[in-house]
Image: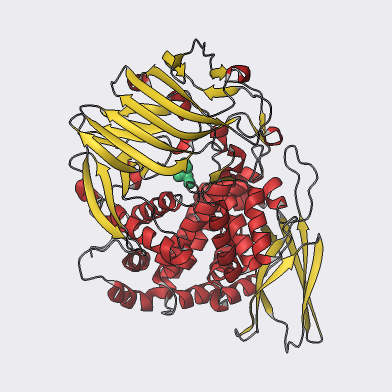
């Protein structure tokens, strides 16, 4: 490993392209042989006779040949170089045989063993631990794989084309980079189902697990089928092979991996039994299954030119899995949870010494860049783009993206150019979101004069390591205005901020409105605005935007709790009445109501008090929070019995979103009832 940074600015296209790869694996725990045949062709984009660099780490080279003639090459610590002058100026075939030791591979990168089964993880740079290869995502090729082993199940990417006792052959016709290669061999059983695509292709679906775990795959399979259908309906994307395999393994570095046609999962994101799994477990399985499946188009068919472009596939795929989950579940709750995670992980990252742009400019170790910034902020950038251009233009741009870049290794420039061509919009300023780190602060003030209401915004882009000076960003600020009687006078409107300071005026208002700003959390910024508890209570009761309704309720609850801790105050009627109204509002999703009833956490409170200059006292915070829950239970007492009764689910257990939301609200109500009764009670 070297400490010299790799820079985006130094990118050079590969010296050679690969027209096809054939691999043979003779599996053995300590001495696996890998035979490779790689058909190269000089890259017309490069001139002269560049050297061909093959990456390779920890490989014992047995033999190598070029067009059949033995090659005397000496690998170095990170690979081997075939000097340009010695290579034909025409297509040629490089063959090699290497030996590797999967049993000793505890880094879980490349080919390794887990509980007697063979398994791979190649993203980002694991393939170089399997054989010599240009292990970079912009080299895409179809793969043929032959696996020889006594183990009963032998899997690789693509479709199985032949098999016999002790061997199987797979062919993946779709050109792919080496990081999407996968191989699994083991004593596994399948939970199987089928799927017919919109154009009538039948796909065999298998989830492979250890014997005994078959019964724990039902929800993952159901999630997969729903994901396949959703991607057809919403993005017009069909699956493109005869088989889709998922394998659950216990030892896995990442959550899961989108290898073409052979996704590999940490078993905790596949296996679940209704008797032991929580509703959150089911939701997570659904989201991760969808995420990996969606990569088939955003990641695999269109991949990244280099690892600086990681957000091209991850930001977009996270955005797509978030859309899927919000279509399957409570959209409001999903958005709130995503924003909570973003603030907890990404905002913290962006405000600290590890801050980096969504598309970094340099790295030393790419494995350190699988971050909340690349994934979660990357997804927020897609959401902002969609908000700025509108849903219809977003759909057109995505169609163009798939049409133009299918089969390619693309860049953020390619992605943004597609949007520029599809919409006629200049995205030069928007691109700053990709190149500058740090969370913008958005300060808001307002005034009302003679029926004119003005909102004034100021954006502050804080310095981050290596980027002391920032430029103003494009910020889509979704706002709505409410009349003092609670009616909405301005439905959600996206204001586009492009300057450091900007004001927006609304005419013809009979009274000073209450603004609901940054609806749906329309941009990943910190909103700074003085708001009174009365206004928060008003928004909690009346805002039509569920995110801001919840946000107002949470801010209010924190105000109330802070005063209870520091001044010994009692929770006032504003908060209690507004929250009670939400709790029994049948037009709101039960999952949302359950979330709204959740009181601020003690940790969260301690941090808020600390930020406000207090020394947080855990015992006082705990006691105040208990009193707060008690007051809420007392206020809601007349409603709780009915809530609990109507939310009971008499039928068999269902892990689905509707039942989960009802369970969540019922549990919240039960929690409050037990407080009124002075302790737990049997149900
Ligand atoms: N590419 C993998 C994923 O996003 C690694 O985390 O799921
Ligand atoms: Zn991913």
**Residue 176 vs residue 234, the one in the foreground:** 176
Q: Quadrant of the C terminus?
A: bottom left
On the rendered structure, is 642 left or right of 510? Answer: left
* Residue 608 visible to an observer of this rendering: yes
Where 226 falls versus 299 (above or below)? below
Where 541 falls versus 304 (above or below)? below
Give coordinates of residue 221: x percent, y percent. 29, 54
Where 546 falls versus 4 (above or below)? below
On the rendered structure, is 361 left or right of 579? Answer: right
Where 229 falls versus 211 (above or below)? below
**Residue 558 vs residue 596, the one in the foreground:** 596
Residue sitting at x 64%, y 51%: 414
* Residue 108 visible to an observer of this rendering: no
**Residue 44 vs residue 236, the one in the foreground:** 44
Residue sitting at x 56%, y 28%: 90
Q: Quadrant of the N terminus?
A: top right
Give coordinates of residue 636: x percent, y percent. 41, 74
Give coordinates of residue 504: x percent, y percent. 77, 73
**Residue 615 vs residue 597, the one in the foreground:** 597
Q: How many numbered marks appear?
A: 0
Residue sitting at x 24%, y 55%: 193
On the rendered structure, is 583 left or right of 417? Answer: left
Give coordinates of residue 565: x percent, y percent. 57, 57
């Amino acid at each position: 490993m070297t400490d010299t940074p790799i820079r985006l600015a130094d990118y050079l296209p590969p010296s050679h392209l690969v027209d096809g790869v054939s691999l043979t694996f003779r599996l053995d725990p300590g001495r696996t042989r890998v035979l490779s045949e790689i058909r190269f062709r000089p890259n017309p984009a490069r001139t002269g006779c560049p050297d061909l660099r093959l990456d390779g780490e920890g490989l014992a080279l047995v033999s190598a040949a070029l067009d059949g003639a033995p090659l005397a090459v000496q690998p170095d610590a990170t690979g081997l170089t075939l000097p340009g002058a010695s290579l034909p100026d025409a297509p040629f075939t490089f063959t090699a045989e290497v030996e590797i030791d999967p049993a000793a591979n505890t880094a879980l990168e490349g080919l390794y063993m887990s509980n007697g089964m063979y398994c791979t993880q190649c993203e980002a740079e694991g393939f170089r631990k399997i054989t010599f290869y240009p292990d970079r995502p912009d080299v895409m090729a179809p793969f043929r794989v032959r696996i020889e082993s006594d183990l009963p199940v032998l899997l690789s990417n693509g479709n199985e084309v032949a098999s016999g006792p002790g061997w199987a052959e797979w062919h993946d016709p779709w050109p792919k980079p080496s990081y999407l290669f996968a191989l699994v061999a083991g004593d596994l059983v399948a939970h199987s189902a089928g799927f017919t695509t919109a154009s009538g292709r039948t796909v065999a679906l298998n989830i492979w697990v250890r014997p005994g775990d078959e019964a724990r795959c039902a929800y993952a399979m159901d999630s997969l089928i729903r994901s396949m259908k959703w991607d057809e309906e919403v993005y017009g994307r069909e699956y493109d092979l005869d088989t889709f395999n998922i394998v659950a393994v216990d030892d896995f570095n990442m959550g899961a991996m989108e290898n073409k046609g052979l996704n590999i999962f940490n078993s905790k994101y596949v296996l679940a039994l209704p008797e032991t799994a929580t509703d959150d477990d089911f939701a997570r399985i659904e989201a991760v299954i969808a995420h990996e499946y969606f990569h088939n188009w955003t990641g695999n068919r269109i991949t990244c030119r280099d690892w600086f472009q990681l957000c091209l596939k991850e930001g977009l795929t996270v955005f797509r899995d978030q859309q899927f989950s919000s279509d399957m579940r409570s959209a409001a709750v999903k958005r709130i949870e995503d924003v909570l995670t973003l603030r907890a992980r990404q905002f913290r990252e962006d405000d600290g010494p590890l801050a980096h742009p969504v598309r970094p400019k340099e790295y030393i170790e790419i494995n350190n860049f699988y971050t909340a910034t690349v994934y979660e902020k990357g997804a927020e950038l897609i959401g902002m783009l969609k908000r700025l251009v509108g849903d219809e233009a977003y759909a057109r741009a995505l169609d163009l993206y798939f049409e133009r870049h299918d089969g390619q290794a693309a860049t953020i420039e390619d992605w943004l150019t597609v949007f520029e061509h599809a919409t006629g919009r200049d995205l030069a300023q928007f691109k700053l979101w990709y190149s500058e780190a740090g969370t913008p602060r958005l300060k808001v003030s307002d005034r009302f004069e003679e029926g004119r209401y003005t909102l004034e915004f100021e954006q502050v882009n804080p310095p981050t390591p290596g980027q002391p000076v920032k430029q103003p960003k494009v910020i889509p600020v979704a706002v709505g205005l409410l009349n003092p009687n609670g009616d909405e006078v301005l439905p959600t409107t996206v204001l586009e901020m492009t300057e450091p300071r900007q004001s927006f005026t609304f005419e013809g208002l009979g009274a000073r409105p209450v603004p609901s700003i940054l609806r749906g959390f329309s941009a990943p910024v910190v909103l700074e605005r003085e708001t009174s508890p009365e206004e928060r209570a008003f928004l909690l009761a009346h805002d039509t935007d569920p995110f801001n309704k919840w946000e107002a309720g949470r801010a209010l609850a924190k105000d109330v709790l802070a005063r209870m801790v520091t001044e010994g105050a009692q929770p006032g009627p504003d908060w209690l009445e507004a929250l009670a109204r939400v709790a029994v509002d049948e037009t709101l999703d039960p999952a949302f109501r359950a979330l709204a009833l959740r009181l601020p956490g003690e940790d969260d409170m301690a941090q808020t008090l600390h930020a406000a200059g207090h020394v947080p006292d855990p015992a006082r915070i705990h006691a105040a929070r208990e009193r707060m829950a008690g007051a809420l239970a007392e206020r809601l007492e007349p409603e709780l019995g009915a809530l609990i009764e109507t939310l009971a689910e008499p039928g068999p257990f269902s892990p689905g979103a509707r039942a989960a939301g009802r369970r969540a609200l019922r549990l919240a109500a039960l929690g409050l009832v037990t407080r009124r009764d002075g302790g737990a009670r049997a149900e």
